[in-house]
Image (cartoon, rainbow, N blue to C red):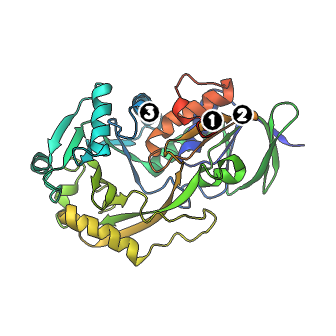
């Protein structure tokens, strides 16, 4: 006989661990299934630090989600008795007529977010590590920006879910699921068969294998991050180096101050735009990865362009418009999915966990997820 649960969550990375946490804390009998180890490096939820920011250039409608995310991250800090969000301020910008600067400014003004507009000279005066930007650069500085501790936030959600009674099982892959005649679901793993009233799929790049509808809507892409040991490390400490998102002629880049490891961390959005098979275990990096990233640091952050101390490959799972995929399935409303976070979703894990718990328990949520509905691609 199959084990029966109120809700099953597939995937226990950033989004799935948060979903299991909120479901369990609401009294649900929850099973969480993860095909890899806890804190594995095969997906999209590792890398020590993740940016969080309020002045959101991608679309102003994200800002209400961000405000709730901040509240929930602080709640999780209190629950875990641990600092999980480090405030550094954030920088977003590039050319004055470019989408990143204009979008961040629009979001800040529309939602009355405290901010300042800085030119390259003023930015360099305040934060000397920002030494190589074009004089025409304009940025939105926002004091509430910073970074989350990626692995520690997953652990906090996992430990909180376990404390609330969740049954979390690692190294157990899911091969398939099916709707049952009673309106629930049956999930078949490589160890057992389970049944539940509701299913929550937070499987990252593997969601498309569980939901063929997502095969063209959640597409994995290879991404590489670098950590360079700064030549002047004092300039890259969290109190002297805000997190950044910058448009430059070479592309869009993002970066972090030194934290935990003695390296200035940064990446190039969409890197070489290489598709990736998530089942390929190869997560190695190449000389051309390092060369592309180092050239950015040497030009724009010369005091940070010391020896390379780490290179890590991971994945973006991109939707066609790079907005998230959060919805119930129209032909199986007892199943909900969170996927396609397109390289900018981690900061939302806390609120996505709440939304997925809402959808599983009530079929709806008070958060406006119209931007993320699957129907926009019909």
Residue 147 bears which disc, if any?
Answer: none
Task: Say if 334 sits above or below 128 in the image.
Answer: above
Residue 330 bears which disc, if any?
Answer: 2
Residue at 14% from the left image edge and 49% from the top image edge:
120
Residue 69 bears which disc, if any?
Answer: 3
Q: Residues within 10 Å of mark 3 (few under 14, many from 20)?
A: many
Q: Earlier in the sequence, mark 3 or mark 1?
A: 3
Under tag 1, what secondary structure? helix
Residue 375 bears which disc, if any?
Answer: 1
Q: Earlier in the sequence, mark 3 or mark 2?
A: 3
Residue 245 pos. (x, y %): 31, 49
Task: Say if 182 sits above or below 343 in the image.
Answer: above
Residue 250 pos. (x, y %): 30, 62
Residue 230 is at least partly visible in this image: no
Residue at 72% from the left image edge and 33% from the top image edge:
330
Residue at the far bottom in the pictured view: 287
Under tag 2, what secondary structure? loop
Residue 153 pos. (x, y %): 47, 44
Question: In the picture, which quadrant includes the C terminus?
Answer: top right
Residue at 37% from the left image edge and 60% from the top image edge:
268
Task: Say if 337 sits above or below 112 in the image.
Answer: below
**Label 3, label 1: how far apart the Cα atoms are:** 25 Å
């Amino acid at each position: 006989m199959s084990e029966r649960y109120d809700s099953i969550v597939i995937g226990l990375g950033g989004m799935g661990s948060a979903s299991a946490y909120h479901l369990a804390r609401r009294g649900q009998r929850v099973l969480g299934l993860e095909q890899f180890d806890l804190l594995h490096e095969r997906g999209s939820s590792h890398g020590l630090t993740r940016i969080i920011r309020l002045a959101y250039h991608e679309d102003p409608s994200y800002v209400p989600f961000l405000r709730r995310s901040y509240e929930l991250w602080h709640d999780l800090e209190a629950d875990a008795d641990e600092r999980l969000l480090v405030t550094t301020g954030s920088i977003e910008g590039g050319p004055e007529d470019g989408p990143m600067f204009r979008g961040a400014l629009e979001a800040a003004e529309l939602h009355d977010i405290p901010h300042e507009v800085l030119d390259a000279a003023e930015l360099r005066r305040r934060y000397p590590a920002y030494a190589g930007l074009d004089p025409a650069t304009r940025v939105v500085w926002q004091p509430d920006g910073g970074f989350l501790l990626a692995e520690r936030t997953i652990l906090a959600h996992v430990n909180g879910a376990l404390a609330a009674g969740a049954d979390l099982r690692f190294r157990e892959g899911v091969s398939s699921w099916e709707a049952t005649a009673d309106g629930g679901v049956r999930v078949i793993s490589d160890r057992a068969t389970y049944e539940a009233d509701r299913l929550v799929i937070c499987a990252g790049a593997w969601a498309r294998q569980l939901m063929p509808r997502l095969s063209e809507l959640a597409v994995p892409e290879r991404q590489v991050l670098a950590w360079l040991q700064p030549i002047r490390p004092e300039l890259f400490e969290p109190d002297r180096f805000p997190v950044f998102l910058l448009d430059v002629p070479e592309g869009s880049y993002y970066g972090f101050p030194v934290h935990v490891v003695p390296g200035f961390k940064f990446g190039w959005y969409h890197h070489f735009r290489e598709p990736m098979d998530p089942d390929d275990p190869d997560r190695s990096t190449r000389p051309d990865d390092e060369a592309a990233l180092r050239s950015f640091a040497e030009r724009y952050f010369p005091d940070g362009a010391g020896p390379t101390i780490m290179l890590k490959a991971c994945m973006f799972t991109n939707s066609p418009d790079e907005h998230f995929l959060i919805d119930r399935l129209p032909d199986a409303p007892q199943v909900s999915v969170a996927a396609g976070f397109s390289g900018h979703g981690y900061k939302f894990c806390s609120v996505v966990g709440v939304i997925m718990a809402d959808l599983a328990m009530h079929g709806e949520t008070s958060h406006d997820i119209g931007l993320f509905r699957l129907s926009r691609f019909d």
